[in-house]
Amino acid sequence: MDLSTVPDPGQNDTGVAGDQQPGAPDDILPTPPPLEGELLPRTVIRLIEGSPHHYGGDQLGPVIAAIISDAQHDKEQARKQVAAIQTQLDKANADLVEQKLRNVTLEERVRASSVRSRFEKFLIFCSPIAFSFALDLYKASSILWLPLAVFGLALLAVNFWPSKGNNS
C-alpha cells in the first residue's frame, strides 16, 4: 500500500469524536471458567461415549475413557497430598520462625549476661582493693577510711542487684 495516497488528517483532526461515555460495570460479561477440574475429563468422556467410532472404535473408546478417568483420580489424589504437604510445610515454617526468634532472644540474653558478668567481676576485683585502702587509712588514723569503706561495700553490693528482665 502506498502511504502517499492516504490523506493527512491535519493538526486539528485527532480522530476522537469527544462524545464517549464511561461504561457501566454491568456491561462486562463474566468470563466462563476454564475447562479444568472434572469438567474437562467429563467432557472428553462424554464425547467418547457419544461417538466411540471417532475415538478408536467400540473397543478402544472405553479404554481411553478409563485412562482419562484414572488420570483424573490420580490428579485429585496428588492435589490432596500437595495440600497436606503444604499445610505441614507452613506449620514447619511457623515453628522455624518461632525458634529463630527464640534463638535471637536467648543470644541477646547471653550477650547481656556476658557484659554484666564482666562488670560484676570488675566490681568484685575493685571492692577488696577499696577495703584494703580503707584499712590502711584507718590504721593511719585518717578520716577518709569511712567513705572508702562505704565505697568498697557499695561496689560489693552492686553484684547482688538483680538483672533487668527475666533471670538469665
Image (cartoon, helix red, strand yellow):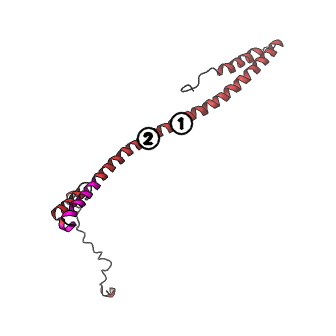
Q: State how far apart marks 1 and 2 are (Cα).
A: 16 Å
Residue drawn where x is 25% and y is 69% of the image: 18
Mark 1 falls on what kind of element? helix
Q: Is residue 148 above or below residue 75?
A: above
Front residue of 137/90: it is 90
Where residue 28 sits: x, y (%)?
22, 60
146 left or right of 114 in image: right
Residue drawn where x is 65% and y is 21% of the image: 158
**What amino acid does circle 1 point to?**
Asn
Residue 54 among those drawn in magenta: yes
**Mark 1 or 2, nearer chain start:** 2
Front residue of 132/67: it is 67
Give the image quarter of residue 89: top left
Residue that mark 1 sits on: 103
Visible residue check, residue 31: no
Where residue 7 sits: x, y (%)?
29, 84
Visible residue check, residue 78: yes
9 left or right of 43 in image: right
Stretch in magenta: 53-72
47 left or right of 72 in image: left
Residue 66 among those drawn in magenta: yes
- Residue farthest right in this picture: 140
**What amino acid does circle 2 point to?**
Ala
Front residue of 76/99: it is 76
135 left or right of 59 in image: right
Where residue 3 sits: x, y (%)?
33, 85
Residue that mark 2 sits on: 92
Give the image quarter of residue 151: top right
